[in-house]
Image (tube, grey):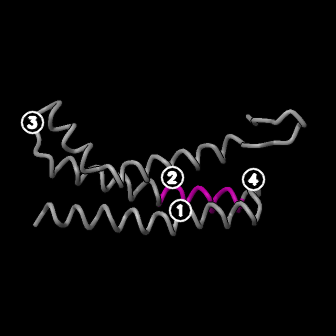
Amino acid sequence: MRIKSKKGRVLVRKNNAILISIIILAVIMGVFGQDFAYFLNWISDDLEPIYNLTVLTVISVSLFLIAILMTCFQYIRGKIGTKQLGLFMFLSLIVGLVVSGWSIFVLAMWWG
């Protein structure tokens, strides 16, 4: 599936949209994990928020790793070019390191 402009140029391919969505979801879960942990605790008092935050942090870091692997596999298969490889690796690595570092720092502060 491709999203085309009026001139017929391909704007976003399905594979690229999935990668971008994974990165955005990982950023949201990493940055707002503490709020989501409190929200999940408000919904259900079964688990302490610290366990919810731990799960959310692991999922966020895992999504960044999945994005890196998907980018490598798509480059090997020839579905993305060198320019897109650089863009997605930059987003996954640089943004992933900053966001994951922040969420791990917050998780470490919660665990004490």
Q: Residue at coordinates 60% horizontally, 65% vertically from top-left?
A: 89
At which x and y percent is residue 97? 43, 69
Q: Amino acid at mark 1?
A: Ser
Task: Locate residue 2: give its quadrant.
Answer: top right
Sequence order check, earlier mark of 4 and 2: 2
The residue labelled by disc 3 is 46
Q: Amino acid at mark 4?
A: Lys
**Mark 4 vs mark 3, CA separation in Å:** 45 Å
Q: Answer few, some or many: residues within 10 Å of disc 2's Cα (few below 14, many 20 plus, some between 14 and 19).
A: many
**Mark 4 vs mark 2, CA separation in Å:** 18 Å
The residue labelled by disc 2 is 23
Element assignment for label 3: loop
Main SS of the magenta segment? helix
The residue labelled by disc 1 is 92
In-image side of 28 versus 37 (left or right): right
The residue labelled by disc 4 is 79
Sequence order check, earlier mark of 4 and 3: 3
Of the pair 68 and 86, the residue shown nearer to us: 86
Element assignment for label 1: helix
At which x and y percent is residue 108? 19, 66
Q: Mark 1 and 2 residues: CB-CB less than 8 Å, in contact?
A: yes
Q: Residue at coordinates 53% horizontally, 62% vertically from top-left?
A: 92
At which x and y percent is residue 61? 38, 59
Q: Residue at coordinates 17% horizontally, 30% vertically from top-left?
A: 43
Q: Amino acid at mark 2?
A: Ile
Give the magenta part as a residue range: 65-76
Q: Mark 4 and 2 residues: CB-CB less than 8 Å, in contact?
A: no
In-image side of 77 versus 73 (left or right): right
Which is in the foreground here, disc 4 or disc 3? 3
Element assignment for label 4: loop
At which x and y percent is residue 79? 75, 53
